[in-house]
Amino acid sequence: MKMKIRMPLCIIASACLLLNSVDMDAWGRIGHDAICHIAERNLTPKARKTIEGYLGNTSIVYCSSWMDEVRDWPEYRHTTKWHSAYVDESGEPCMGTNFKDGEYRGDAVLELTRLIGRMEDWKELDDSTVAVGIKMMIHLVADMHCPGHVKYPGIKGFKVIYGGNEVTYHYVWDDAVLERVHKWGFTEYGHILGNLSRREVRSICSGTPVDWERENARDCRVIYDWAHPGDVLGKEFNLKAKVLADSQIQKAGYRLAAVLNAIFG
């Protein structure tokens, strides 16, 4: 006999608020784990051993979403706006020019660049500072590659119908696409997207984070041609979205490995 379960209105309301949050975490747990897994498979033995030592002898996958988990802690509240990368009308990364009402809003690319410079002297830093730096770098590389976290001037958030629910388009790219198009675990992403040739890896990893974000801005702008306020998104959208999502996860994974190898390898 089937049982009908009635959910209290407060639970339903809370779920709706969660689905429609405009400040969800880029990629969600699966995406961040997948990026870290691809990166981990491409770390040098020296880099992997050093990094794991600072992270309590655990995988970088374990810390992939650490920045999302601590963003509301008083000591890390200043990092709340670091999770997006802002570009100007031409697609050029804004970096330190990202201000609102005279106050710096935060930017993933700028903060990642600062961290890389600081971590080049990691041997001179205390263990906790190095550990936090690693956790931040692995997260910021991922966030700057998420299509929904590339911020273009004049484009504001809007809602669409996806999976039968009204949700923000931002949420579609943060979590929903990965949940619907493959239903993979993070190891499957690594198995399928983590086997590029050395030549392909060199091509993907050439340049700097600023160059990478310039490319992200160019490649991800198309998502605002694929959907508009109130659209019902279905199979046609998913076919296009999964190709872009897979590509961005793949690039982020290899580029994260490149950043960590350059510092610790």
Image (spheres, helix red, strand yellow):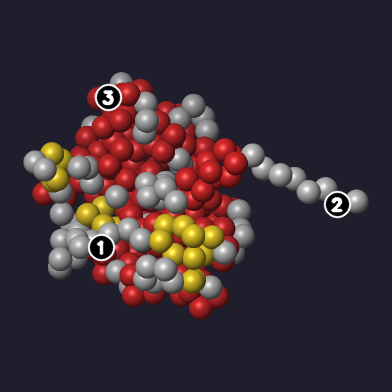
Residue 177, horizontal then vertical, whole percent: 50, 62
Residue mark closest to the camera, 2 vs 3: 2
Residue 191, horizontal then vertical, whole percent: 58, 60
Q: Nearer the viewer, residue 8 or 238?
A: 8
Label 2, residues with CA under 10 Å away: few <14, some 14-19, many ≥20: few
**Residue 220 relative to residue 34: left or right:** left
**Mark 1 = which residue?**
155
Mark 2, secondary structure of its residue: loop
Residue 84, horizontal then vertical, whole percent: 29, 50
Label 3, residues with CA under 10 Å away: few <14, some 14-19, many ≥20: few
Cα distance between the residues tagged 3 and 1: 40 Å
Q: Decide: is 142 above or below 244.
A: above
**Mark carried by residue 2:** 2
Residue mark closest to the camera, 2 vs 1: 2
Q: Decide: is 181 above or below 256.
A: below
**Residue 226 relative to residue 187: left or right:** left
